Image (tube, rainbow, N blue to C red):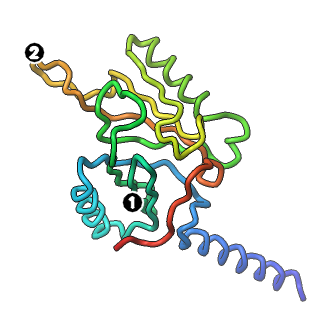
Amino acid sequence: MCAWGIFLTIVTILTFVIVLLKVLPVPFFDSNGSTLMMPTSESQRTMAMALAEVVGNPTATLDTEYAHRFLFRDGTVVDWLSRKPPFEPMYNVVALKTVVIGFFRCFFTTPMKQASKLGEWLVSRGHRVQIVGQPDPAFPSGSVVLILSDAFEYKCQEEDHAHSGYGAAILIRRHAFLVGGQRPQIGSPF
């Protein structure tokens, strides 16, 4: 076989593998995402179905003792907490920005190190911080870390209602292949 034939064979195989990895629900290309926290199972299902109309059906579900999750291919997650979390949050979290530590980067840093670094940065700017090293016991301690801060809390404009009791948070986790704990159920629930 000539060099040109070998080159085309390699390109064809690589293209096939890349397309296959993108199409399969396996999170090889795990990326940052956002999580919407819904107040009821009905609102969670309705939100997931509405998103499915725009971005496609969820590719998996991940249910633990504390949370039920619809996972979408674009990194969006729609959660419903079926029970009170195993920690006392400084406010009710309604949205999360998920930061994924890449597969190879996981060998050089941890979610807790990154959360501590972010927490120090927020404290240096006068903010209060709550770092939760195991927000869901279904995952090993330190593989998923939640950061809450008064900087992310939704605040009302009126002074007598300075704190709404709601806010966003940042979740830092290991790559899906390395996070450990409970695994998602592959396939759309719809």
Instruction: Classify mark 2: residues with Cα within 10 Å, few (<14), some (14-19) or many (20+).
Output: few
Classify residue 126 as left or right of residue 162.
right
Frontmost residue, 2 versus 39: 39
Question: Looking at the image, is 162 positioned above or below residue 3?
Answer: above
| Residue 56 figure quarter | bottom left
- Give the percent coordinates (x, y) of residue 119: 49, 21
The kind of secondary structure element at disc 1 is strand
Element under label 2? helix
Count the numbered circles shown. 2
Residue at left 9%, top 19%? Answer: 158
Structural distance between the alpha carbons of marks 1 and 2: 37 Å
Q: Which residue is drawn at 56% across and 23% down?
A: 117
Residue type for callout 2:
Asp
- The image shows residue 83 at horizontal and vertical percentages of 33, 44
Residue 7: image quadrant is bottom right
Judge from the rendering whether residue 158 lies leftward or rightward of residue 35; answer left or right: left
